[in-house]
Amino acid sequence: MKTIQDYIDSLFLGIAETNQTKQLKEDLLASAEDRYEDLKSQGKSENEAIGGVISEFGSIDELLEEMNIKQEFIEEKGYELDEITIEESFDFLKVCHRAATLIGLGVMVIILGVAALFVSMALYGEGVAEGLGLLFVFLGAAVGVPLFIIAGTSLSNTNKKLDDRFISIQVKNEIKKRKDAFQRSFIFCMVAGVVLCILSIIPVVFFGTIYGEVFFGMACLLILASFGVFFFIFGGVIMGSFTKMLEQTYFISDEGELGPRAKAERDSKRPVWFQTIEKIYWPIIVAVFLCQGFLLGNWGSNWIIFPVAGIIFGILESIFSKNE
């Protein structure tokens, strides 16, 4: 343990010793001791446990910056900064995980409803399918839309609860561990989504070329694509929840009026015009999707608009957003 204590002491070399830095050093040492005992209980050797503890330390500059933020707030407001607790951050991740599942299932059910439309057209002809097939489409929407509402409401309530509150280094360290643990699952989701979307083209070619059944091919395309889109949404929403907590100093809610510190941080990272576009971007994408489907009947390849729109938005966000 002396090795860990010496390492922590070395982090504070050249830093003036105050009550705050002294308390910070004690907190770090206590946390390191707990982590050391945890690694030892997992069967790690002493050297492996010490190496594991040291490798998990963040930058001392980040800790000192956090202390300055807290001190400035106290001097300005006269009371302690309202921080998000570790338990609240874990609850936020749980809500996002549940929302990712519900949103993914909602989109999946809607796409499967359209797939059922093509199956009915293949079995009973286009005339009968106009009634029976559209029934499946509306049933899919009737199931999918409530799932969106449930997910959106839970996310909105959680975001409003955490809005404008400080995200400490301790919370970010715990979130980072969760993110690292999810990394493999995220890669699997992205790979599975891409593979399924690519494979979805095969049934169209197979049934269309060999049997002349385009409708069956389109139904199979939509079924495979629905699973692919689910993986995209599930992995993307969960990874986004980690990124949201790690890249922000104050929690920025996506709902309602922002608090003063959250608004200042958001405005410093995104131009005003980009914030305006962000509000109307996805409603326009959904409107285009519905118009393509109901007015032009282009349900077969219409789903591709969502992953493409997501990629384009991600590129624009990375270009015009300032990440300190």
Image (spheres, grey):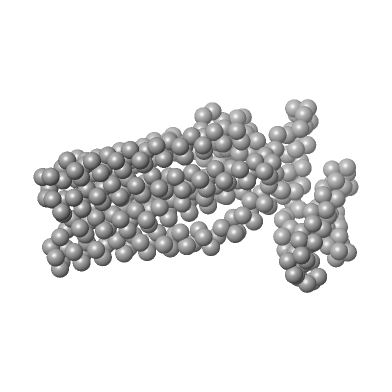
Tell me residue 206's x, y (percent). 20, 66
In-image side of 5 versus 77 (left or right): right
**Residue 290 visible in the shown view:** no
Nearest the camera: 3 or 59? 3
20 vs 42: above or below = above
Could you tell me how many numbered marks the image carries?
Answer: 0
Tell me residue 321's x, y (percent). 51, 45
Tell me residue 195's x, y (percent). 37, 64
Tell me residue 273's x, y (percent). 45, 36
Nearest the camera: 231 or 319? 231
Q: What's the residue at 26%, 43% (across, down)?
A: 137
Nearest the camera: 318 or 210? 210
Q: What's the residue at 61%, 43% (across, down)?
A: 91
78 vs 134: above or below = above
Q: What's the residue at 78%, 37% (across, down)?
A: 71
In-image side of 137 versus 54 (left or right): left
State the quadrant of the N terminus. bottom right
In-image side of 85 versus 137 (left or right): right
**Residue 125 visible in the shown view:** yes
82 vs 123: above or below = above
Q: What's the residue at 38%, 61% (across, down)?
A: 194
| Image quadrant where residue 122 sits | bottom left
